[in-house]
Every structure is written in C-alpha cells, then in structure tokens.
Image: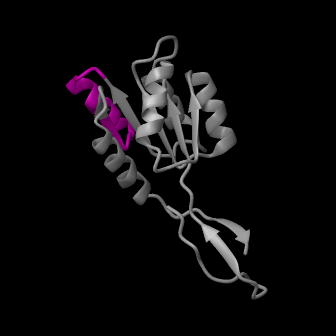
Amino acid sequence: MNTPSLRGDDGTLVAVYRTERLLLVDADAASLQATRRMLSRWPDQRSATSGHLAIRMAWASEPDLIVIDIDMPRQAGLQLFLELQADARLCRIPVILLSSLRDDALEAITRLGGAADLLPKPLDAALLVSRVAAALSRMPARGRELAA
C-alpha cells in the first residue's frame, strides 16, 4: 500500500510511501513462484531457496514479514524460524509458516515460538493474502521519503 504524506522539515513537499517488503522462503522453485503470484499485492518481494540464504537476505533487506515453508530439505524451515527468533535484530520480524503437515505439537511450537501464523499447504490464496495483510497491519509504519 502506498500512502502519500505531508512536507519535510524545510517546508519542501515530500512524499512518504509505506512499502511493505516480504521475504519468501521455499526450497521448491515452483511453490515459491506460486506464493509470489498470490502475494503480488506486495511487489517488494525477496526470495530465498535455503535457510542460510534467508538469514543473509533478512539481514540485508530488513523485511517487514517473512513467509517460510517449513517442509524444506537440508535446513528445515522450523529450524530457520527458531534461528530468526534467537537473533536479536531479526526476532521482531513477524513470520508466517507454511506446512503440509497438520500436527498439534507443530502448532504449539510455532505459537509458543512467536510465529504470526501457521497456514496449511496447499495454500489458499485468499487465506494467505488475508493473513499476510493482518500480520503487516500489526506492524508499526515504516516509510521511505522521496522528494516530490
């Protein structure tokens, strides 16, 4: 969502746009592409195909929300989530987890661990969009100033 705003300190007209940045993490390229399309309402998206790359990208791009498929090979998405929660800088970023597994223990771990949400796969586009929008609406506004 782009929301223009007011003037700068020196009186010049300044536009401030709030653009939410998403980091999408999935080892499967086709699933990642499908998730990107479902979330096209938020064009500022970064993608990672491994947990290691996701941590580096989160540090570099400071996303407003991270969406992780926990069913990844090598480094499981749940392990990535726990690493994010243990990082003093990254733990404030809301995380939505995706999983084809339905398990009460998994739900309890993700809720207690601080996940914003746990969604079932295959994904329902409307549900994903509504949960991402809800998680972002709970975040403080972040703007970027552009001279108008």
Magenta stretch: includes residue 28: no
For this rendering, which residue is in front, 65 or 38? 38
Measuring 27% from the left and 20% from the top, which residue is drawn there?
101
Find the residue positioned furthest to the right.
10
The segment highlighted magenta reads 100-118
Is 11 rendered above or below residue 115? below
How far across and how far down the image is residue 40, in percent?
A: 47, 45
For this rendering, which residue is in front, 45 or 99? 45
What quarter of the picture does the C terminus occupy? Answer: bottom right
Measuring 38% from the left and 33% from the top, which residue is drawn there?
97
How far across and how far down the image is residue 27, in percent?
A: 50, 19
How far across and how far down the image is residue 13, in percent?
A: 71, 82
Where, by quadrant of the figure, is residue 116 drawn? top left
Magenta stretch: includes residue 111: yes
Measuring 42% from the left and 26% from the top, which residue is drawn there?
69
Measuring 46% from the left and 50% from the top, which residue is drawn there?
41
